Image (cartoon, rainbow, N blue to C red):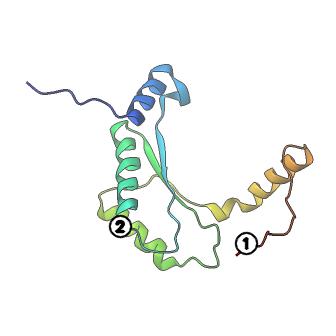
């Protein structure tokens, strides 16, 4: 006799979403590392969670590099991250870079500001007191 393993809270949410038809019953996860260093054990946990859930529910995982400052990032880290993911036994569906969307994100911000839903804080930084 085998014991049925209970679902964790993420799996419960996914199962509810699939049952309700939310998102078309499709499971799509993402792993968003910053390509400014090598991965550590916390990254491995996130990789296994995101890619593992996608596998369990016959979905896909996107690799989205969070290169918010592309000038400081190095392709050595991008290549290392890809190799580590594959070493853990996973493959990604699509590869994206946050910097590819900077202009679009900027235009969204402009629209929000123009509509009165956001503003630019141009105040000077406060100095810390001793």
On the rendered image, what quadrant is the N terminus found in? top left
Q: CA distance from mark 1 to mark 2?
A: 41 Å
Q: Which mark is residue 84?
A: 2
Q: Are marks 1 and 2 in contact (CB under 8 Å)?
A: no
Tell me where residue 107 sits by quadrant: bottom right
Q: Secondary structure at mark 1?
A: loop
For this orientation, the residue located farthest to the front is 130
Residue sitting at 53 percent across and 79 percent down?
74
Q: Position of residue 10 (x, y in %)?
A: 42, 36
Tell me where residue 80 sits by quadrant: bottom left
Label tally: 2
Q: Secondary structure at mark 2?
A: helix
Of residue 71 and residue 55, the one placed in the foreground of this image is 71
Residue sitting at 46 percent across and 52 percent down?
93
Q: With 26 as the anchor, is 11 left or right in this view?
A: left
Q: Position of residue 6 (x, y in %)?
A: 27, 29
Q: Which mark is residue 64?
A: none
Q: Position of residue 128 (x, y in %)?
A: 73, 72
């Amino acid at each position: 006799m085998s014991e049925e393993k209970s679902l964790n809270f993420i799996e419960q949410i996914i199962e509810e979403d699939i049952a309700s038809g939310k998102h078309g019953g499709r499971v799509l996860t993402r792993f968003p590392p910053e390509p400014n260093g090598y991965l550590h054990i916390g990254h491995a946990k996130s990789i296994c969670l995101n890619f593992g859930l996608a596998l369990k529910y016959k979905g896909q995982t996107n690799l989205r590099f969070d290169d918010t400052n592309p000038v400081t990032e190095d392709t050595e880290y991008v290549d290392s991250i890809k190799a580590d993911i594959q070493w853990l036994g996973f493959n990604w569906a699509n590869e994206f870079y946050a910097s590819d969307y900077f202009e679009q994100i900027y235009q969204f911000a402009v629209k929000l500001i123009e509509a009165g839903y956001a503003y630019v804080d141009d105040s000077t930084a406060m100095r810390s007191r001793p």
